[in-house]
Amino acid sequence: MKKKIAIVKGDGIGPEVINEGIKILETIEQYSDYKFNFIEAPMGGNVWKKFGDSLPESSFEIMKQSDAILFGAVGLPDIPQGVAEKAILRVRQDLDLYVNLRPVKLYPSLHDMCPLKTEIVEEGIDISIFRENTESVYAQIGGIVNQESAINSMVYTRKGVSRIIEYAFNFVKKNKLEELISVDKANILTVSQFWRQIFQEIGSNYAQIKQINYYVDAFCQWLIRDPSSIRTVVTENMFGDIVSDEAAYLVGSLGMGASGNINPHGVSMYEPIHGSAPDIAGQEIANPIGTILSIKMMFEESFQDVKMGKFIDKAVEDSLRSNRTSDIYSKYAQNNVNIKRVNCKEMGDAIVKRLEILLKN
Ligand code: NAI
Ligand code: MG
């Protein structure tokens, strides 16, 4: 299977974590039928400094013509605000990446990193949040009216709402899960009532899947009261932004979070949830797991290869038993002689080693 992968290393720790991601892909290439063609697509602050453009047209062309995009992070402290963000927004918009998927998983060996009490998370956390990525208040409809008021309109379209809900239902079905939770504010907002109606309509085609409607405020409480009982969530753009940040914190480090910006009928982009982390850039201590788990999603969502996703996940889980980067090197880890503090490259090496064993068998 030949796959063209556009590589956006970006700024700060971007290149460091992406290099570890590429090692994972090269390992997969060695032990499977996949053949990858990596093409670098420069983007971000460093590119802006050189060419005055944070997303050169040639880079965008490379992304457009790839089978998937692997993205590190962009942004530098010494460039004007908005320059790097503009490039990301352009990619999301022009490739119509309408599904934002953020899985949140607490691995058994990382329980000490969770800010919640042990008894609450004994059964682990494994949540997938599907956030609508193109509409609602983020569509920037509105503005300052006068000195006394400002408006942002929350606009939903049937097309926008239907396609994200459909994708989430499909995910539940594909992964043989039992239920889908839809998060809204239908007790107050008309747009939410519209959303809920469409959720019901589409849900009627998935009668075997249990369907739960939940208000966003109550859902934020549920998330910290009993996260183990939540598995798949679909919601609109702003609620998804907030709820997914809350959920991401449950595993203790930004460095662990993966995400996908998905267009099911086009090219999708996979990226760790963290930024370019200028405070630790160049030290080779960044946690590459967010990037590696983004690659797991690339296999599951873009290459329809759930099995390879499971291998990557298992390799990460196994490696975490005895290796931790600084961001997850807790007091508990310090006091445990079996857990080594490792740098970015060593973490990547440990995961590659586990993955090799899994793929050979
Ligand atoms: P950040 O995510 O870069 O860093 C926040 C904190 O988390 C820092 O202390 C950092 O050291 C730590 N951290 C982040 N990733 C880590 C990793 N893999 N391993 C260990 N520690 C990690 O967010 P911040 O500082 O707000 O933003 C820095 C720059 O990144 C800004 O220019 C911002 O605009 C940009 N940014 C870019 C994003 C993207 O490219 N998608 C997303 C978020 C921010
Ligand atoms: Mg956010």
Image (cartoon, rainbow, N blue to C red):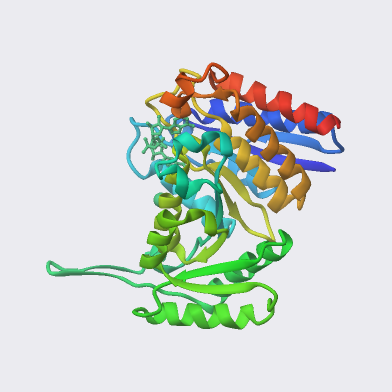
Q: Quarter of the image containing the N terminus?
A: top right
As drawn, is 61 to the left or to the right of 73?
Answer: right
Q: Quarter of the image containing the C terminus?
A: top right
Q: Quadrant of residue 237?
A: bottom left
Q: Residue at x 47, y 29 (%)?
A: 328
Above or below, comparing residue 187 to residue 145 in the picture: below
Q: Residue at x 52, y 83 (%)?
A: 197
Q: Residue furthest left?
A: 147
x then y, percent, for residue 202: 63, 79
Q: Mark yes or no: residue 343 visible.
A: yes
The foreground one among 271 and 313 is 313
Above or below, comparing residue 339 to residue 314 in the picture: above
Q: Residue at x 54, y 71 (%)?
A: 160
x then y, percent, for residue 54: 47, 39
Count of labels in the image: 0
Q: Mark yes or no: residue 66 visible.
A: no
x then y, percent, for residue 28: 78, 33
The foreground one among 115 and 54 is 115
As drawn, is 292 to the left or to the right of 286?
Answer: right
x then y, percent, for residue 134: 49, 63
Q: Residue at x 85, y 30 (%)?
A: 360
Q: Quadrant of residue 217?
A: bottom left
Q: Quadrant of residue 198?
A: bottom right
